[in-house]
Amino acid sequence: MTRKFDGDRLLVATHNQGKLAEITEILAPHGVSVVGAAQMDLPEPEETENTFVGNARIKAHAAATATGLPALADDSGITIDALGGAPGVYTADWAETPNGRDFIRAMTRANDELTAVNAADPRLAQFRCTLVIAWPDGHDEVFEGVMPGQLVWPIRGAHGFGYDPMFQPDGYDITCAQMDPAEKNQISHRGRALKQFVAGCFG
């Protein structure tokens, strides 16, 4: 039985303002005030696990322990079938440069590696999001969302972020970066995980 959320404040363990805004909007009808990690001066814990759920648990439990508030954290990324599920938990690492994250570089690497292994079309991939809500007593609940699709090249579209310009969701002939952001949020991996979270903890 999923533990219900019965408080009035939820800490979202992220320093990403876009992610914080999306979660705040989704929880608005439930009368929950949402606070972000930056507002609480929380450091970002080191993500030492090799699974999405492991890293989300690290972030959620660290934030709940530090603040005494229930804390929601996510870990997300892209898995590419022809690359054995890479980059997976290392999705953001592929974009790291000495000057910050460069997702053009990350997408180029993905396409180069697919070309190197002669990956056939469609080049199947999935955006994955694992959400963990942790309570200060150590209990947690896990929710997962997956958006299946395929990778296209050259990249298309100016919306979104990360690998969106090369990811075409199943059932669409445009990439995530060509979609209206509100439409993308309805079908996104994070949107799907958040719907499960709301149904499980607020339903």
Image (cartoon, rainbow, N blue to C red):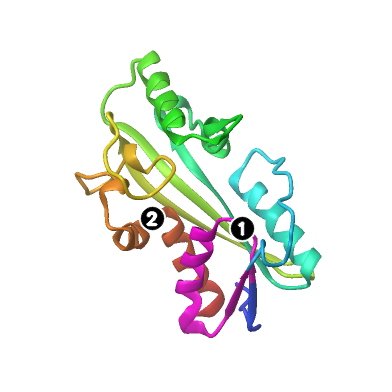
Residue 14 in the image: above or below residue 111? below
**Does residue 138 appear anywhere in the picture?**
no
Residue wearing tag 2: 188
Asked whether residue 16 is drawn in magenta, I would say yes
- Residue drawn at 61 percent across, 56 percent down: 15
- In the rendered image, residue 64, in percent from the top left (x then y), is placed at 74, 66
Name the element at disc 1: loop
In the rendered structure, which amino acid carries the disc numbered 2?
Ser
Range of magenta residues: 11-35
- Residue drawn at 27 percent across, 53 percent down: 179
Q: Residues within 10 Å of mark 1 (few under 14, many from 20)?
A: many
Residue 124 as seen in the image, left or right of residue 52: left
The one of 120 and 103 positioned closer to us in this rendering: 103
Residue wearing tag 1: 14
Residue 165 in the image: above or below residue 133? above
Name the element at disc 2: loop
Image quadrant where one finds the N terminus: bottom right
